[in-house]
Amino acid sequence: MLQINGLGGGYGDLTVLHDVDLDVAAGTLQVILGRNGAGKTSLMSAIAGLLPTISSGTVSVGGRDISALPAHKRAAAGIGLVQEGKRIFRTRTVEENLLLGTYSGPGWSMRSPHRKKALAAAYERFPILHEKRTDRAGGMSGGQQQMLAIAQALAADPQVLLLDEPSAGLAPAIRNEVFDTARTLRDEGLAVVVVEQLVDVALDVADTVAVLDSGRIVSAGPPEQYRDGELLQAIYLGG
């Protein structure tokens, strides 16, 4: 569903990604591991069309090359990104946030059938959002805000969902709920890509793992390959 070939880029003259290759099938949960500064968030931004400079390579969704598309058109092409830090519109209501998430969908009316269906799906998946639909999003708990961020990305009906550090700042119980949601979405047929610092938690949910270091994929394989920690330790410590 998601295919990345030879992707390179960064921030102006500063190159942070080098010749990245990654394939993620539909119905698969791909975890990206790496130490701080390895380029994980930059990779997610590059896939979503937010990295300022792309110097090489291609990004495809369902066989369609979307490399030349800006971020909003990539959303319409099937890429959903949940950025680190619960990036929601805090002064808007929960329902307004969800409606804004449908921007790339068909039709112009904010109350079109497509958008009504997206709202109903969000409220069914996350009942707390229905309960708080008229509340300002910034007044909710951190876990509720993360659920809203995920629901907002899903409102555009993506084929690929990118989750950047989804557990950051969350209590363990809420963190587990977030990863249960990621697994459910995988089981529903989405290609899910998760960047995560908590290695043990990430390996528990992963179908496949790729390790990024200095902007390159330096190791990839099944989660069992990394459970003893020796390989990751060698990579993280420069071995």
Image (cartoon, grey):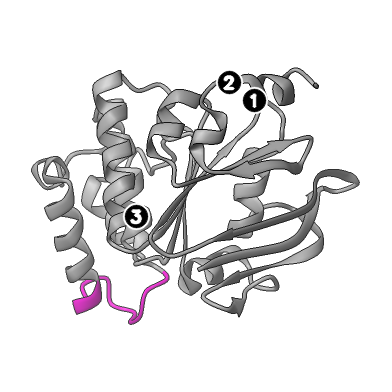
State yes or no: discs 2 and 1 in contact (Cβ < 8 Å): yes
Residue 214 in which image quadrant: top right
Q: What residue type is labelled 2?
A: Gly
Identity of the residue drawn at 64% across and 25% down: 232
To which residue does mark 2 refer? Answer: 229
Q: How crowded is mark 2: few (under 14 residues within 10 Å), some or many (20 or more)?
A: few
Disc 1, SS: helix
State which region is magenta.
104-114
To which residue does mark 1 refer? Answer: 232
Q: Which of 115 and 25 is in front in this view?
A: 25
Q: Nearer the viewer, residue 214 or 69?
A: 214
> Which tag, 1 or 3, sits closer to the chain's start?
3
Q: What residue type is labelled 3?
A: Arg
How far is disc 2 from disc 3 in space, using C-alphas? Answer: 26 Å
To which residue does mark 3 refer? Answer: 186
Identity of the residue drawn at 32% across and 28% down: 175
Disc 3, SS: helix
Disc 2, SS: loop
